[in-house]
DNA sequence: CTCGCTATGTATAAGCC
DNA sequence: TGGCTTATACATAGCGA
């Protein structure tokens, strides 16, 4: 009989959507996740296929920062800000604000370079420390690890992290009753903790930190561009 | 009559291509242009649909800088650079159009500070490494760490964990396109030596170059994108 | 948020201007 | 470098888990 004649469509398939802010909260969130992934994938392909340097920073509608960078976000941003850490020859023909600006620019570029180097070294050391902890003698770089290796390394780190976390809690608890003698400075690092703008992401994309620091400053409403059909 | 039914295909249609550097110079260039446009379009859609803030910087294989920014690249980069290290809220209305020198000065100060932080941090890590090598007993080691050391070590692990996670993400993503993990990659041959902060991209994308901190160095200017007409 | 599934909307590799 | 056209490879909206 006609009982099963109708194989109801299992899906509505992809629907065309208007190019304007998605109002439905949930749908917007899901769309963001999917498209962010898609965007980063496209960026990855572009850099691989054409050997281009790419840097992307995305703040989710909720205010969470995500970033992508190849070879690294720092590298690209620094270059953008400093106007080229290498101080290209073309630079000598400029006279925007006289020598002062020029001088500042040079110093800026120099600092940027040093900063990057410092970060690089720092990253190496951090890696060394962790690697030591995880597996004495393990000097393989994360970048060269295979999926399986990463899996196990990741687990090891997780365990370590928990261990450290609990130990810290213990200390914190103690310090609550007696002023703890913290030596050295606040060790504020780079403002919002490790790795946000650090050189840890070399050619990869990753959620950039917790992002709680920013809160959200909602994007000033964006009208659809006039050229959208 | 129409016996001549065979109209030779006018096109081969889209061909599947391997995810690896395109060797043919010309094809690579063309691919770059097309995909760059596609990437920017995707970014535009993401920002409109989900109300996200996005910033992108791309250096073409030839070294030409292109950028995209919503609400503006400067806005996004500024956030990343100063990273809320100083004052998150105030940064909101950074005057890029106004005093460039002032901006540069702030950057300079910020970088100097970060450099010092990095140095301090490096010292800490070196000690950590030494301590580690001196006594490979993890738990014991953790138990003896001071609050501050734990803080930094914890951050180190967090960063590493993220790094591992991203690496894995990359492997997974790539394996979806090409069933082979890229080890190391085609090698980085990056370093074009220029790129400037245009400060003029408000909402739309355009090649960076014109009106930067240093003036322009022969970057071809670029009209608004006429696609999606 | 992430993952899978399906039906479709789109981005694009080629080739020629 | 962009534009156009065509035939396809991919991305992704809507819905569930």
Image (tube, coloured by chain):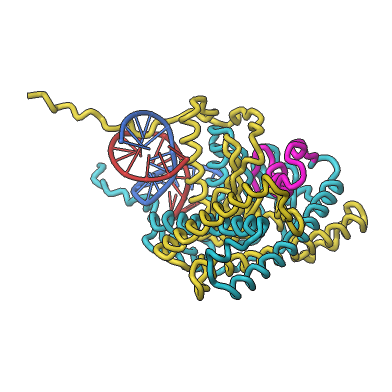
Chain colours: A yellow, B cyan, C red, D blue
Q: Position of residue A45 (x, y in %)?
A: 49, 55
Apparent side of residue C4 relative to residue B212 in the rendered image (left or right) = left
**Residue located farthest toward the front when viewing the structure as drawn:** A177
Q: Is residue B65 magenta?
A: no
As for residue B72 lying within the magenta part, the answer is yes
Residue A45 visible at all: no
Q: Is residue B47 left or right of residue B183?
A: right
Query: As rendered, which of B132 and A23 lies closer to the eye?
Result: B132
Relative side of A183 to D11, left or right: right
Residue found at x 83% / y 58%: A105
Give the image quarter of residue A13: top left
Identified at 51% across, 75% down, the residue is A137
How many numbered discs, if any? 0
Span colored in magenta? B67-95
**Left or right, residue A219 beside residue B139:** right
The answer to which quarter of the image holds residue B113 is: bottom right
**Residue A170 in the image, given as x and y percentages of width and height:** 59, 51
- Residue sitting at 59 percent across and 71 percent down? B132
Residue A86 screen position, x and y as percent? 75, 66
Q: Foreground: B201 or B8?
A: B201
Residue C8, quarter of picture: top left
Q: Nearer the viewer, residue A153 or B94?
A: A153
In this rendering, does residue B25 appear at all?
Answer: yes
Given residues B31 and A86, the one toward you in this image is: A86
Identify whether A17 is placed above or below B136: above
Query: In which quadrant is the N terminus of chain A drawn?
Result: top left
Taking B125 as reference, is B3 above or below it?
above
Q: Position of residue B5 (x, y in %)?
A: 26, 46
């Amino acid at each position: 009989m006609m009982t099963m004649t109708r194989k109801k469509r299992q899906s509505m398939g992809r629907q065309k959507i208007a190019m304007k802010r998605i109002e439905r909260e949930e749908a917007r969130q899901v769309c963001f996740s999917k498209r962010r992934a898609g965007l980063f994938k496209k960026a990855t392909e572009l850099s691989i296929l054409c050997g281009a340097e790419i840097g992307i920073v995305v703040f989710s509608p909720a205010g969470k920062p995500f970033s992508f960078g190849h070879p690294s976000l720092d590298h690209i941003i620094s270059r953008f800000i400093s106007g080229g850490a290498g101080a290209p020859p073309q630079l000598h023909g400029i006279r925007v604000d006289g020598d002062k600006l020029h001088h500042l620019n040079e110093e800026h570029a120099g600092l940027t370079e040093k900063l990057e180097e410092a970060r690089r070294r720092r990253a190496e050391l951090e890696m060394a420390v962790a690697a030591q902890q995880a597996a004495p003698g393990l000097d393989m770089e994360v970048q060269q690890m295979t999926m399986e290796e990463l899996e196990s390394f990741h687990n090891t780190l997780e365990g370590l992290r928990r261990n450290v976390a609990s130990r810290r809690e213990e200390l914190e608890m103690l310090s609550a009753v007696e002023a703890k003698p913290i030596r050295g400075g606040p060790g504020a690092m780079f403002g919002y903790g490790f790795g946000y703008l650090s050189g840890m992401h070399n050619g990869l994309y990753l959620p950039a930190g917790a992002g709680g620091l920013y809160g959200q400053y909602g994007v000033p409403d964006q009208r659809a561009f006039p050229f959208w059909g």
